[in-house]
Image (tube, coloured by chain):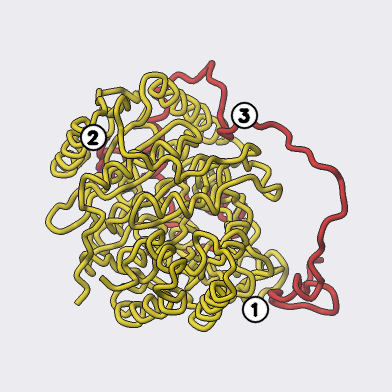
């Protein structure tokens, strides 16, 4: 088990503008202090991840899933439905039979 | 001994013989909760009246001379990321603070059919992301063996509740060690089943290719009883195994003659506390004295498990947690100018620091230009890790290792450095990547703190793991020790 010191592995892989871009993709709003923290921490973590490049994986099949399962089919039958009131019970805002959200366009 | 520390299988016999009532068991546990919960803080929600009503129902069945199932009337605590219809399920997150599921997880339906008594929902690291419960948005659970220390995580509430006698049994979930690590820290047993053995329907998804629900107990027989109830095919989980599981109590025989134990060298290296290694070596000596053989084996890709896991799990999490957008359920932030702004404000205010960090990491690993370098690379290394285990299991029946590099650490000790916190799962992560079963059992103590031994097996070999745990227990008393909570 390798132990790592953050100083040794510190290498700039991810920049502030990349953190901003990723935050936008992830629909997160970050203040300046948070951006700094993430730049720093993600760089440390990603530098550690570089360890994987020691391995030649050119001819290795990726494993997304451990089971020998492919498509799992079922009959297209009408199942049980949850009543609309139950579906809407946790809605932050609703109107009639709908979830209500702020304007989109 | 008080009822709250009795084994479930013994309580069942007492119920059948009418020596006690289910209501008495429930009251014993609830009284214990009221005595120690201030210190332990294992529960986010307690069910009190519902639990008592459920227990009384079991007593009525017994009075009517109906046959009761093995877990009938047995108190069980549920990790708060498993959906319980009508009972708040928070994932220890502000974003789900008031979420009341409109349906039950399949494991909850199975427990209800078995007449088990759900006594509450236990604390965890937010969305099961963490190793100490310090990432809970509400509070940190204490380790019953030393209140200044963490109970482990993410299923820390479940493990602490079982150890403190605040429940007889518990359910947790394990994505990278979240059942085994807290079980080890709290001196109880915890099992991560083979991927696909227990339905994930209704388990709030963290990393779907790694998540499994599993049982906590204070002895191997109870663990087998609970696994009997929760395992099996579920059409609502497409990754659920179709073949019916065996009766796990059938494996609780009294010998390990001929059992071939492999000891992965990479799990006993310098990162592991010397005293932890001693405990594991003593446990191995015990098992070989009982007729097993033990030999060193190599899992050469072990050191890559941590970086592989921390790419795959956050990648899957970033996708799974996209659903928390403030539209259909959960918290919604106010003062948004439009829809996207509402998503951003909701998620930024609703998620805690570690969850956001993992969403950021996972989103980055999956984003255009980085997918091949990080995510795809990790999936390929996952294959190599899985093959290491396949190779080892061609020569060995079980593998034995420590569960954690050290006993429970102090609260606050690792919160400043995410990588250091991640390192506490170094012995457990690979098992989820390979999808195999793993069990943590009490194997000794260091300065009054429990140390766990991890037993690993081939896919769907839970029976053999339970057998070894059972025999070890028959010949040791570590699992019988109780924390002093005066």
Q: Say which of B289 and B320 sits in front.
A: B289
- Alpha carbon distance from label 2 to label 1: 63 Å
Q: Which residue is mark 1?
A: B335
Q: Residue at x 27, y 35 (%)?
A: A2
Q: Is residue B425 visible?
A: yes
Mark in the foreground, 2 or 1: 2
Query: The residue marked by circle 1 belongs to what chain?
Result: B
- Of the residues under marks 2 and 1, which one precedes in the sequence? 2
Q: Say which of B455 and A15 sits in front.
A: B455
Q: Secondary structure at mark 2?
A: helix
Q: Residue at x 33, y 78 (%)?
A: B32
**Rendered location of residue B288, percent (x, y):** 21, 30
Q: Colour of chain B?
A: yellow
> In which quadrant will I find the N terminus of chain B?
bottom left
Work out whether disc 2 and disc 3 sit on a shared chain.
no
Q: Secondary structure at mark 1?
A: loop
> In which quadrant will I find the C terminus of chain B?
bottom left
Residue B384 vertical position relative to residue B76 in the rendered view, above or below: above
Q: Which residue is mark 3?
A: A68
Residue B468 vertical position relative to residue B64 in the rendered view, above or below: above
Mark in the foreground, 2 or 3: 2
Confirm or deny contact between disc 1 and disc 3 (CB under 8 A): no
The chain drawn red is chain what? Answer: A
- Alpha carbon distance from label 1 to label 3: 48 Å
**Rendered location of residue B266, percent (x, y):** 28, 29
Q: Which residue is mark 2?
A: B287
Q: Say which of A53 and B75 sits in front.
A: B75
Left or right side of B219 for A13: right
């Amino acid at each position: 088990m390798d132990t790592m010191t953050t100083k040794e592995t510190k290498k700039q892989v991810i920049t502030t503008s990349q953190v901003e871009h990723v935050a936008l993709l992830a629909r997160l709003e970050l203040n300046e202090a948070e951006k700094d923290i993430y730049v720093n921490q993600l760089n440390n973590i990603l530098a550690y991840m570089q360890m994987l490049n020691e391995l030649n994986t050119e001819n290795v099949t990726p494993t997304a899933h451990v089971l020998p399962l492919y498509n799992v089919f079922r009959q297209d039958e009408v199942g049980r439905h949850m009543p609309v009131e139950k579906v809407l019970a946790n809605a932050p805002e609703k109107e009639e039979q709908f979830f209500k959200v702020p304007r989109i366009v | 001994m008080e009822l709250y520390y009795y084994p479930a299988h013994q309580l069942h016999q007492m119920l059948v013989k009418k020596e006690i009532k289910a209501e008495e068991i429930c009251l014993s546990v609830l009284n214990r909760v009221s005595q120690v919960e201030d210190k332990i803080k294992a529960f986010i929600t307690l069910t009190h009246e519902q639990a008592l009503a459920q227990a009384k129902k079991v007593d009525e069945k017994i009075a009517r001379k109906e046959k009761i199932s093995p877990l009938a009337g047995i108190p069980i605590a549920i990790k708060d990321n498993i959906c319980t219809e009508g009972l708040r399920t928070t994932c220890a997150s502000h974003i789900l603070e008031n979420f009341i599921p409109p349906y039950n997880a399949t494991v909850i339906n199975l427990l209800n059919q078995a007449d088990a008594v759900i006594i509450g929902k236990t604390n965890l690291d937010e969305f099961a992301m963490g190793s100490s419960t310090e990432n809970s948005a509400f509070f940190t659970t204490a380790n019953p063996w030393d209140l200044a220390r963490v109970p482990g995580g993410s299923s820390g509430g479940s493990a602490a509740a079982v150890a403190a006698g605040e429940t007889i049994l518990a359910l947790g979930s394990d994505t990278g060690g979240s059942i085994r690590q807290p079980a080890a820290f709290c001196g109880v047993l915890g099992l991560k089943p083979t991927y696909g053995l227990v339905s994930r329907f209704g388990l709030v998804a963290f990393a779907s290719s790694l998540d499994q629900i599993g049982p906590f107990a204070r002895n191997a027989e109870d663990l087998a009883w609970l696994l009997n109830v929760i395992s099996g095919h579920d059409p609502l989980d497409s990754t659920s195994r179709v073949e019916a599981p065996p009766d796990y109590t059938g494996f609780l025989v009294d010998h390990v003659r001929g059992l071939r134990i492999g000891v992965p060298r990479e799990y006993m290296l310098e990162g592991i506390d010397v005293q932890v290694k001693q405990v594991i070596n003593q446990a191995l000596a015990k098992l070989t004295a009982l007729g097993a053989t033990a030999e060193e084996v190599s899992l050469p890709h072990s050191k890559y498990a941590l970086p592989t896991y921390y790419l795959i799990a956050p990648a899957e999490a970033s996708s799974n947690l996209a659903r928390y957008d403030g539209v259909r359920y959960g918290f919604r932030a106010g003062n948004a100018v439009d829809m996207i702004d509402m998503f951003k404000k909701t998620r930024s205010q609703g998620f805690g620091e570690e969850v956001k960090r993992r969403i950021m990491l996972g989103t980055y690993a999956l984003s255009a230009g980085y997918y091949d370098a990080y995510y795809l690379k990790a999936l390929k290394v996952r294959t190599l890790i899985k093959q290491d285990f396949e190779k080892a299991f061609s020569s060995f029946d079980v593998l034995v290792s420590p569960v954690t590099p050290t006993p429970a650490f102090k609260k606050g000790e690792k919160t400043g450095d995410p990588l250091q916190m991640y390192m506490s799962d170094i012995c457990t992560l690979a098992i989820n990547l390979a999808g195999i079963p793993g069990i943590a059992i009490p194997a000794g103590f260091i300065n009054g703190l429990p140390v766990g031994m991890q037993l690993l097996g081939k896919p769907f070999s839970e029976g053999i793991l339970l057998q070894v745990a059972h025999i070890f227990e028959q010949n040791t008393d570590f699992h019988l020790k109780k924390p002093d909570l005066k």
